[in-house]
Amino acid sequence: MSHLDHTPSTPGKFKMDKSAYPYHGGRLRWHSSLAKLTFWSFVFIGVIFIFFYRSPRFHSDPSRRSLRTSSWGGPAWEKKVRTSARIRSRNGFSVLVTGAAGFVGTHVSSALKRRGDGVLGLDNFNDYYDPTLKRARQALLERAGVFIVEGDINDAALLKKLFEVVPFTHVMHLAAQAGVRYAMQNPGSYVHSNIAGFVSLLEVCKEATPQPAIVWASSSSVYGLNTKVPFSEKDRTDQPASLYAATKKAGEEIAHTYNHIYGLSLTGLRFFTVYGPWGRPDMAYFFFTKDILNGKSIPIFEGENHGTVARDFTYIDDIVKGCLGALDTAQKSTGSGGKKKGPAQLRVFNLGNTSPIPVTNLVTILERLLKVKAKRNVMKLPRNGDVQFTHANISLAHRELGYKPTTNLQTGLKKFVRWYLNYYSAAGKKADAR
C-alpha cells in the first residue's frame, strides 16, 4: 500500500471574497468586551496555576511526559531546515508546523508540502502514546520532503533560531498535550504544553520581523457544560468540564491578548473529535478497534437515565481542508519587532462534521468492518471531564473558509480500519523478523 494512501487530497488556495463577509477585514468581532476577556484570562490562568501548585506532580516534574530538546544547530542542520521550508509554488507560504509528528500535524504538513508550500516541522516526540507511531509518521513526512526538528516549544532559544534561519510567513500551531482523561493523572503536562508552550511560541512570533500569521488548534471541549446545541462560536465557553478544556480556553484568551497588544494575526480552530488513518491510539475509535480484534471488552458510556453519548466525529481530510482554508484566508500580522502598528485579524472557528453519532453506532460500524462482535461493557459516564454530547455549528467556517465536510462516519471508519490492519500487520512482520 502507498504510504500516502490515506492522506488528504490537496485543495488549492482558497480565494476570499471579502465583500461577501459581514466582518470587516475578516475579523471576527467577539461578543465579550476587552475588560471581560482580560478578566477571564487572569481567572483561568490563576485557577489553573493554583490547582497546579497543589499537585505533587507539579513539584516533581511538570514536563514528565516530554523528552528533552535534542541537539540542534550547525551548517548541515540549517541546510535541512532551509530546504524543508523552501517555497516551491507561486505565492506559496513558508509554514512552521508545531506538533508535526502528531495526527493532525502529519496530515496538514503533507497536504501543505504537496501543494508547494515550504514546511518545517517541530515536535518533541513525547511518550504520551507510543512514540513508534510518531516516528513512523516522521518517516512518512521525510519521504515527502518535510524535515521535523526535534525539540520543545518551550525552548525559546530553539524557536528564535528557527525564525532566524527561516522568515516564516505562517505558523500552524498544533503542538499540545491532548486527552481529557489524562489531565487527572498528570495535570502538569497540560500547563507546560498548552499554556506555557503557547506563550513561548507567541513571544517569539511577536518579536519576529515580519511577524507570521498564526493558525492554532483550540478544541470543541471549550464548550464544556454548555447545553445549547449545536455549539456556535458565539456560545459561552466559561464552564470547562476538564483541565484540558480549561487550558484550551485559556489559550483563546491569551491569543486575544497577544492580538490586542502586539498585532499578531491569530485564528483558532475548535476541532470536533477528529479520526482517521494515522490517528491517536488514545481515541475511542482506535482502541475500540484494537480491543475488539483482541477479544477484549470495550467500555460503552451512557449519561444519566441511560442517556445517549454522542460525538460529532470529523474525518481527518475534512479537518485538513479547514486548516488550509484558515491559512489561506489569514491576514498578515500588523506588528514588527514586538510593536503593534495597527488592528490585526482575530478569528475562531468550529471544524466539525455537523452530524453527531451515538458511540454505540460507531461500535456497530466497527463490528461490521472488522467482522468481529464486540464485547460491550455498558457503564455510566465517569466524572473525568468527558461530556455527553458534541455538535458543531459550522456556518461561520463555511462562509469564511469555504469549509464543507464530505466524509461520513461509515466511509471514514472504513479507511481507518484498512490503514490500521495494514499498518499493524506490517509492524508485526517487522517485529517477527527481528
Image (cartoon, rainbow, N blue to C red):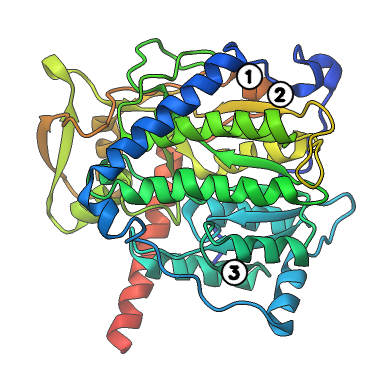
Where residue 317 sits: x, y (%)?
A: 56, 44
Asked whether disc 2 touches disc 1, contact meaning CB atoms under 8 Å apart, the reply is: yes
Task: State the SS at label 2.
Answer: helix
- Viewer-nearest residue: 375 or 246: 246
Q: Residue at x 61, y 72 (%)?
A: 142
Considering only vertical position in the picture, is 268 above or below 23? below
Marks 3 and 2 sit apart, C-alpha to C-alpha, by: 33 Å
Q: Which residue is drawn at 82% across and 44% down?
A: 336
Tell me if 231 is positioned left or right of 141 in this view: left
Residue 276 in view (yes/no): no
Three-letter amino acid code at the position of disc 3: Val
Task: State the SS at label 1.
Answer: helix
Quarter of the rendering containing residue 285? top left
Mark drawn on residue 400: 2
Which residue position holds label 1?
Answer: 396
Where residue 84 sits: x, y (%)?
A: 72, 68
First in sequence: mark 3 or mark 1? 3
Three-letter amino acid code at the position of disc 2: Glu
Query: Is label 3 or label 2 in front?
Result: 3
How many C-alpha atoms fall within 10 Å of the one at disc 3: few (<14), some, or many (≥20)?
Answer: many
How many C-alpha atoms fall within 10 Å of the one at disc 1: few (<14), some, or many (≥20)?
Answer: some
Marks 3 and 1 sit apart, C-alpha to C-alpha, by: 34 Å
Q: Which residue is drawn at 46% across and 17% down?
A: 231
Residue lying farthest to the right in this orientation: 90
Residue lying farthest to the bottom in this orientation: 434
Quarter of the rendering containing residue 199? top right
Asked whether disc 3 touches disc 1, contact meaning CB atoms under 8 Å apart, the reply is: no
Tell me if 55 is positioned left or right of 258 in this view: left
Which residue position holds label 3?
Answer: 149
Quarter of the C terminus within the rendering: bottom left
